[in-house]
C-alpha cells in the first residue's frame, strides 16, 4: 500500500475558498482571480475576493461621468 495511491494532488490543494466580502464558499480555480501568475496553481496564488465581488467593487469605485449643465462649458 503506497501513500501516493491514497492521495491525489487535488486532495492536497484547497479547492474551495470562502470569499472575504460575500462570505460564500466558492470553487477556488473558477471563481477567484489569480494574483500571481508566475507561481503556478498554488492556493496562495489566488485572491481572497471572488470574481463577482471584485467586479462589483470596481464598478462602484469607478468615477461617474460629470454631466454638463447649460451654463457650463467643456474644458477644451
Image (cartoon, helix red, strand yellow):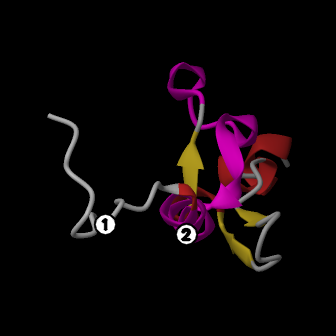
Residue 2 seen by the camera: no
**Span highlighted in magenta in the image:** 36-60
Assign a secondary structure to mark 1: loop
Q: Badge 1 local density, few (<14 within 10 Å), some, or many (20+)?
A: few
Counting residues from the N terminus, which is met first, the one under dot 1 or under dot 2?
A: 2
For residue 48: magenta? yes
Q: Which residue matches tag 2?
A: 56
Q: Nearer the viewer, residue 8 or 64?
A: 64
SS at mark 2 in the image: helix
Q: Which residue lies at the image location 79% right of the left edge and 48% below the top edge?
A: 12
- Relative to 74, does residue 30 appear above or below in the rendering? below
Q: Position of residue 52 (x, y in %)?
A: 54, 70
- Which disc is residue 54 wearing? none
Where in the figure is residue 26, as x and y percent of width and height?
A: 68, 73
* Residue that label 1 marks: 67
Q: Quadrant of residue 29?
A: bottom right
Q: Residue furthest top?
A: 38
Amino acid at each position: 500500500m503506497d501513500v501516493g495511491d491514497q492521495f491525489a494532488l487535488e486532495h492536497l490543494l484547497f479547492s474551495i475558498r470562502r470569499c472575504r466580502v460575500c462570505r460564500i464558499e466558492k470553487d477556488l480555480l473558477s471563481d477567484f482571480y489569480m494574483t500571481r501568475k508566475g507561481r503556478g496553481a498554488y492556493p496562495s496564488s489566488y485572491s481572497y475576493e471572488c470574481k463577482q465581488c471584485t467586479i462589483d467593487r470596481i464598478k462602484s469605485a469607478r468615477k461617474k461621468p460629470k454631466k454638463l449643465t447649460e451654463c457650463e462649458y467643456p474644458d477644451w
